[in-house]
Image (spheres, coloured by chain):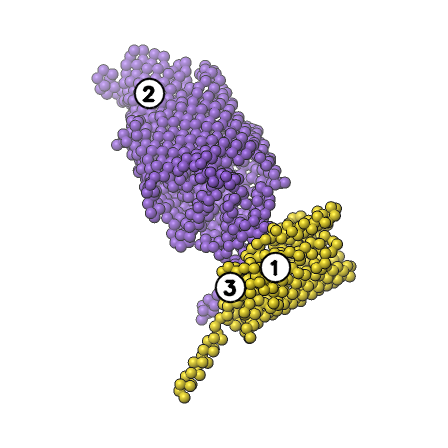
Chain colours: A yellow, B purple
């Protein structure tokens, strides 16, 4: 009896110790396997111009696929393909729909289509850190060939758009958030950790400071909640005709697969407030804006 | 209990103040304005200089560092193989994003071939108004302080006896450290490793007072600012059993992230025996004089101050300097006269005490309107007040029988007194406006008020006092333009001076002083420079002081209250050639120059027809010019550093009344420096200074050569011992022979120190205390390594 009780106590202690042992969240991806990232985002934008309010709805769907080409120590070469970048903008003044899977007629559509055609390879650490691109020059050069098919009258503008879309920071900010949620050290339930990255588009750079909390672990799945504080960076381009200044927060819940380290599902709600500034000659027009967004991202094998 | 609560509250406050921060910015090439990719950007925590995070710049030149903390102070260190390493402090910000904006990197303009071929750290860069000398590690290791480093720069001479600085033979030199006016004492406080570059400005712009002959601007290494540093040295310098000299220097400074404090003191003690001979022939009078002069000299300097950089846009410097100089001389001069075939012997004994000290306070403020441009404003205010400035001169003559040299009679001891009070207040403000990134407009105003009050007392002559007041107002405006292959600058300074001497207006002067310079860079190895400037030579207060001073039984000297400023128009044409062949790097700069002088101030000796006494008076004589050529070599041959500056001058002075005939003279000087490392941390060093005759009015002076050779050893723990031998094969030291010729007098005199075996033994020690300093030391060493990697740097 004594032996049984002692064994029971030891077993309980072991279980509780196991429960308390920190978990290491690292990427452990299968070489050659294709993973799909699907992201759906709805944004309701309220903009005020000349005292009048306008509502703009933006719906975007993005599908990426990626696969590990090779791994040396803790660094992987991952090939990304931006399968679909689709967006639909609805406003009282105009509606526009773009889809990169279609060849398109406008220069921007052609560029987006080419972006969906080629693969870009980046070095990513197993801790989820973006290190560098491997073939950025080749990738952008391949896409820029499409400008030959753009009429000469539109080519200069198209080149500017292409360069803005294909700049390293813009492409990096499409890839970096996919893995930028992992802690640097092993974590226990209840622990928090911080991550940050920049989200760069043609006219706006937003810094996201994220705080993650490990809520629980169940069936090899980690539940993580968190908040993000986001703030736009002041524009450094003195010639920019349009700049945006935004600040806001978001909350998110995500599920991390402990085997692969991937965030297989992430749901977030965000609220931003700020202004859009437009230069018209020497006069500046300031338009206040509010953005409420819902985003869901799913990664599947 | 309340105390505990307070502690907890303070901790909570501290915790809440701490927040993460992202630092970002972009790097661009200074010349092409294109983004710089793959530069390593280090986030360095201050003051311990530890690296917090390292990032590479992207193809857009962007870098992002995520691990900063709003409560801490950092600097960024940006490194790239083809750019100069940049260390910049970061202004503290409370926001989560600290966007430092665009950082421009200055390329090392060399190609890969040069990297392979050259291995030198010797750099010389010709800019419009200045020559910039990079200070190689070898110079630093063989120097005891900043002034000693300056000795190794071509075109600069620093006298080993009095530490007088001359540039190309000119004496009115302004010293700046990082653009702030300083004195020699401040230079001596700088540890050699703090010095990065030396700029020698031989054609000063309108920013500087019109009588400044040249400017030396020492550029320090900003990385050396942090932490506690100190250095000290002591040297002993015997010339003979009669003459010796000792020197000591100590400095201490402590730098925080925004402010650094310093204190330094140095002193020189001299006990010197000077021998002098003089032979004068004037009509039927011949004099042979043999003098024995014993001099005891003490010089001291204390500098205290602070440098405050609240942020990257503002810079404040406060400095208080105390300078002291005292000397006591005992002259015993035997005079053997022959007048109309009658012999006489008399002995002149003269004991003189001279003391002067003063306090110089200066405040400098610099503001940049934008960190990435040169748009800025600087202001400087200086006040000098002499504390104790007097000379006492006791003298008498003793007469002897020329047959048996027995004493016949002796005159009473007489006393001359001079007491001078000096007060000067000066201020200057400069404004720089860049536009279109190629044009720069500079303007500034300055004001100087000088007041000299000299009380003279003499038992022999009516001793006139002098009350000299001088109010000078000046201003300048200049425009410069940078081209891809050079630059051009033109401007003018305007000065108006109002001088009052003994309540009488002596003169009001208005002087337009134009200047211009241009550089043209043919390629990285060939550079041409042409410069013109008009400068003023103002009479000194000693030259103006009408006090009559007895030189010897037949000669008096006095100042000239009626002296007017002289002007000189200087033209320079310089070609700079850089050569790199295997392990040899040569920077060769031949120069042609021409200087026209109007109303030269020179000493004239004439015989007073009434008293028969010779009078030595500074006078505005006629005009003249100086022309010639110079060759400056700055080189590294393997491990040997060799600098040389040879200057050939041709002087012409127009005829002046019946005192000076139209005169043509040739002269030259050659200064050189050689240094190379020896095994076991020994170093060999040698200095040669040879000068030709110098003409001042009727006086031609020839100085003996100065040469020095020796070496040093650096021991572990920053201890250094140096031993140098001076003029080892000459019996005379600092020998100066003067000849005066005019239609009434021929005089030849010779002053020298007897030298048996002159050597200097010096011990130097520098220290850096504490953990902070150890890391700082690493930081500096790292920078030195960086320089090695990037060599050769063509600025």
Q: What number of labels is visible? A: 3
Quarter of the image for residue B394 reads top left
| Image quarter of the N terminus of chain B | bottom left
Which residue is nearer to you in this view: A127 or B153? A127
CA neighbours of label 2 inside 10 A, class few (<14), some (14 to 19), many (20+) = some
In this picture, residue B350 sits left or right of residue B64: left
> Mark 1 = which residue?
A80
Q: Which label lies toward us, 3 or 2?
A: 3
Which residue is nearer to you in this view: B169 or B494? B169
User: Badges 1 and 2: C-beta atoms under 8 Å apart?
Assistant: no
Q: Which label lies toward us, 1 or 2?
A: 1
Label 3 chain ID: A
Farthest front residue? A32
CA neighbours of label 1 inside 10 A, class few (<14), some (14 to 19), many (20+) = many
In the structure shown, which secondary structural element does the residue marked by tag 2 occupy? strand
List x then y, in percent, for residue B437: 61, 41
> Mark 2 = which residue?
B278
Q: Can you tell which mark lies on residue A184?
A: 3
List x then y, in percent, for residue B444: 57, 37
Answer yes or no: is residue A53 visible. Answer: no
């Amino acid at each position: 009896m004594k032996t049984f009780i002692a064994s029971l106590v030891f077993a309980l202690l072991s279980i509780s110790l196991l429960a308390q042992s920190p978990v290491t969240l690292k990427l452990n991806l299968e070489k050659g396997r294709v993973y799909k990232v699907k992201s759906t985002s709805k944004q309701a934008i309220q903009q005020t111009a000349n005292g009048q309010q306008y509502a703009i709805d933006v719906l975007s769907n993005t599908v990426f696929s990626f696969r590990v080409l090779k791994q040396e120590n803790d660094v992987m070469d991952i090939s990304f393909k931006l399968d679909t970048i689709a967006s639909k903008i609805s406003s009282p003044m105009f509606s526009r729909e773009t889809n990169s899977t279609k060849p398109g007629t406008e220069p921007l559509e052609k560029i987006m289509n080419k972006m969906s055609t080629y693969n870009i390879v980046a070095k990513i650490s197993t801790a989820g850190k973006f290190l560098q691109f491997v073939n950025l020059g080749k990738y952008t050069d391949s896409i820029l060939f499409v400008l030959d098919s753009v009429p000469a009258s539109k080519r200069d503008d198209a080149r500017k758009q292409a360069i803005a879309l294909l700049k390293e920071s813009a492409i990096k900010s499409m890839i970096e958030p996919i893995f930028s949620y992992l802690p640097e050290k092993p974590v226990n339930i209840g622990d928090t950790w911080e991550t940050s990255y920049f989200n760069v588009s043609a006219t706006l750079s937003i810094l996201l400071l994220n705080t993650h909390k490990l809520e629980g672990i169940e069936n090899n799945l980690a539940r993580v909640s968190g908040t993000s504080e986001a703030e736009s960076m002041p524009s450094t381009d003195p010639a920019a005709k349009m700049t945006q200044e935004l600040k806001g927060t978001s909350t998110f819940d995500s599920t991390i697969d402990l085997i692969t380290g991937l965030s297989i599902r992430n749901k977030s709600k965000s609220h931003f407030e700020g202004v859009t500034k437009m230069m018209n000659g020497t006069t500046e027009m300031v338009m206040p804006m509010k953005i409420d967004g819902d985003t869901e991202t799913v990664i599947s094998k | 209990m309340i105390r505990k609560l307070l502690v907890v509250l303070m901790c909570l406050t501290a915790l809440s103040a701490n927040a993460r921060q992202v630092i970002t910015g972009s790097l661009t090439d200074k010349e092409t304005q294109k983004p710089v990719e793959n530069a390593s950007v280090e986030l360095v925590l201050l003051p311990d200089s530890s690296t917090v995070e390292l990032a590479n710049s992207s193809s857009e030149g962007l870098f992002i560092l995520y691990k900063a903390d709003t409560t801490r102070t950092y600097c960024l260190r940006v490194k790239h193989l083809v750019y100069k390493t940049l260390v910049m402090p970061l202004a503290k910000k409370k926001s989560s994003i600290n966007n430092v904006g665009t950082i421009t990197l200055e390329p090392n303009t060399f190609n890969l071939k040069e990297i392979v071929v050259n291995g030198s750290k010797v750099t010389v860069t010709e800019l419009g108004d200045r020559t910039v000398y990079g200070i190689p590690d070898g110079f630093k290791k063989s120097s005891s302080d900043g002034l000693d480093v300056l000795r190794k720069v071509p075109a600069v001479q620093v006298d080993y006896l009095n530490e007088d600085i001359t540039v190309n033979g000119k004496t009115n030199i302004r010293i700046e450290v990082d653009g702030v006016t300083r004195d020699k004492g401040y230079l001596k406080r700088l540890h050699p490793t703090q010095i990065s570059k030396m700029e020698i400005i031989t054609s000063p712009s309108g920013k500087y007072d019109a009588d400044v002959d040249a400017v030396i601007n020492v550029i320090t290494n900003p990385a050396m600012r942090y932490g506690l540093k100190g250095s000290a040295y002591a040297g002993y310098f015997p010339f003979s059993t009669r003459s010796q000299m000792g020197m000591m220097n100590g400095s201490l400074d402590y730098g925080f992230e925004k402010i650094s404090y310093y204190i330094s003191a140095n002193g020189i003690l001299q006990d010197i025996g000077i021998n002098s001979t003089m032979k004068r022939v004037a009509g039927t009078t011949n004099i042979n004089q043999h003098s024995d002069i014993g001099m005891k000299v003490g010089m001291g300097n204390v500098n205290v101050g602070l440098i405050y950089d609240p942020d990257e846009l503002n810079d404040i410097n406060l400095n208080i300097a105390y300078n002291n100089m005292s000397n006591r001389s005992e002259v015993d001069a035997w005079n053997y006269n022959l007048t109309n075939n009658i012999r006489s012997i008399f002995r002149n004994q003269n004991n003189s005490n001279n003391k002067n000290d003063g306090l110089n306070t200066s405040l400098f403020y610099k503001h940049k309107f934008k960190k990435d441009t040169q748009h800025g404003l600087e202001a400087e205010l200086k006040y000098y007040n002499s504390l104790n400035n007097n000379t006492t001169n006791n003298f008498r003559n003793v007469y002897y029988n020329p047959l048996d040299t027995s004493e016949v009679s002796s005159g009473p001891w007489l006393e001359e007194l001079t007491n001078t009070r000096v007060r000067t207040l000066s201020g200057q403000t400069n404004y720089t406006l860049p536009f279109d990134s190629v044009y720069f407009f500079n303007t500034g105003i300055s004001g100087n008020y000088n007041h000299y009050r000299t009380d003279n007392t003499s038992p022999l002559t009516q001793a006139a006092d002098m009350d000299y007041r001088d109010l000078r107002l000046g201003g300048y405006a200049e425009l410069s333009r940078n081209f891809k292959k050079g630059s051009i600058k033109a401007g003018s300074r305007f000065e108006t001076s109002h001088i009052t001497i003994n309540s009488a207006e002596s003169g009001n002067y208005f002087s337009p002083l134009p200047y211009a310079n241009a550089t043209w860079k043919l390629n990285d190895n060939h550079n041409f420079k042409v410069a013109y400037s008009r400068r003023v030579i103002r009479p000194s207060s000693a030259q103006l002081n009408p006090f009559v001073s007895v030189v010897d039984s037949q000669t008096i000297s006095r100042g000239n209250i009626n002296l007017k400023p002289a002007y000189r128009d200087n033209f320079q044409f310089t070609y700079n050639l850089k050569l790199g062949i295997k392990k040899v790097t040569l920077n060769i700069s031949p120069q042609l120059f021409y200087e026209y002088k109007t109303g030269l101030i020179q000493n004239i000796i004439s015989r007073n027809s009434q008293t028969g006494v010779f009078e030595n008076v500074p006078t505005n004589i006629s005009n003249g010019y100086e022309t010639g050529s110079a060759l400056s070599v700055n080189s590294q041959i393997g491990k040997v550093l060799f600098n040389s500056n040879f200057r050939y001058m041709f002087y012409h002075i127009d005829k002046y009344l019946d005192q000076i005939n139209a005169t043509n003279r040739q002269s030259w000087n050659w200064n050189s420096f050689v240094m190379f490392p020896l095994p076991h941390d020994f170093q060999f060093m040698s200095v040669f200074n040879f000068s030709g005759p110098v003409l001042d009015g009727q006086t031609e002076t020839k100085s003996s050569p100065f040469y020095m050779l020796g070496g040093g050893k650096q021991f572990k723990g920053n201890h250094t011992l140096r031993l140098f031998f001076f003029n080892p094969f000459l019996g005379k030291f600092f020998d100066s022979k003067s000849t005066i010729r005019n239609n009434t007098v021929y005089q030849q005199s010779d002053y020298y120190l007897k030298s048996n075996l002159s050597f200097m033994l010096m011990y130097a020690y520098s220290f850096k205390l504490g953990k902070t300093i150890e890391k700082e030391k690493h930081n500096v060493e790292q920078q030195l390594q960086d320089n090695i990697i990037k060599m050769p740097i063509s600025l």
